[in-house]
Image (tube, rainbow, N blue to C red):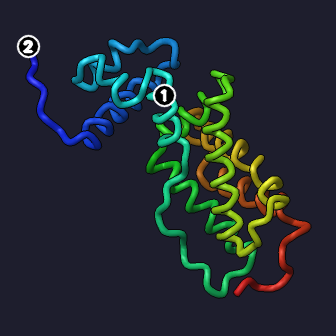
Amino acid sequence: MTTRSRLAPAERRQQIIDAARVLYSDRAYDDVSTAELAEAAGVARGLINHYFGDKRELFLEVMRGSILMPTQALPDYDGRTLEERARLTMDWILDAATTYGQAWVAASGAANLHGASDVQAVVDEADDRAARLVLDALGLPDSPHLRARLRPMAALTKAVCREWLQRKTYSRDEALDLLTDSVLLFVHDHAPTKEVP
């Protein structure tokens, strides 16, 4: 019988999320039982309910953590043109996809497989956050209209990253070129024509 170490509640909660992330990285939601989640985390089944309410809430927490882009510092944009900013930003996103890689790509791809409104809400939140990040990086105003123009870039970015990281049909440079050209196209009508300060 395995003895469980005593952890602070926040640490225990994170331990469960980390174990669930591993299981969900290559298996669908319905293929993972609560008993398996508890065993992988080294906790009693009741702790899943204690910390998350139920298995679905744990899954949503894993999704939320897996598909939100990281908040690491953006590159230095001082004196860069819009085109340079776009390339640097897409390069930064590809770096993040490499670092958070398979979990992010698998989770972002799996999001559409479940179709439930709670999963879609998590995906929408992540896509909106990504649009705000890109607008800020490009030096463009955070307006509802521009965010709406950029949110579809999230789906394209996830698809390109799956092609590059999982299917190996793109090189990193091809992925970078495609995403840079695309983001410029999405903001074309609203982009400043001069260098962004």
Quarter containing the C terminus: bottom right
Image side of residue 148 versus residue 159, left or right? right
Q: Going from the N terminus, do you reach mark 1 or mark 2 first?
A: 2
In the image, residue 153 lies at what x, y percent? 74, 50
Query: Residue under circle 1?
Result: 57
Q: How many marks?
A: 2
Image side of residue 163 versus residue 62, left or right? right
Residue positioned most to the right: 189
Image side of residue 114 versus residue 20, left or right? right
Give the SS element for disc 2: loop
Q: Nearer the viewer, mark 1 or mark 2?
A: 1
Specify the amino acid type for callout 2. Met
Give the SS element for disc 1: helix
Location of residue 36 by image quarter: top left
Location of residue 91 by image quarter: bottom right
How packed is label 1: few (under 14 Cα within 10 Å), some, or many (20 or more)? some
Query: Residue under circle 2?
Result: 1
Q: Which mark is residue 176?
A: none
Distance between the alpha carbons at the discs numbered 1 and 2? 29 Å
Image side of residue 5 versus residue 34, left or right? left
- Work out whether 194 lies above or below 94: below
Mark 1 near mark 2, Cβ–Cβ under 8 Å? no
Quarter containing the N terminus: top left
Location of residue 85 by image quarter: bottom right
**Residue at (47%, 24%) from the top-left corner?**
26
Specify the amino acid type for callout 1. Glu
In the image, residue 30 lies at what x, y percent? 52, 13
**Residue at (52%, 31%) from the top-left corner?**
60
**Residue at (46%, 46%) from the top-left corner?**
100
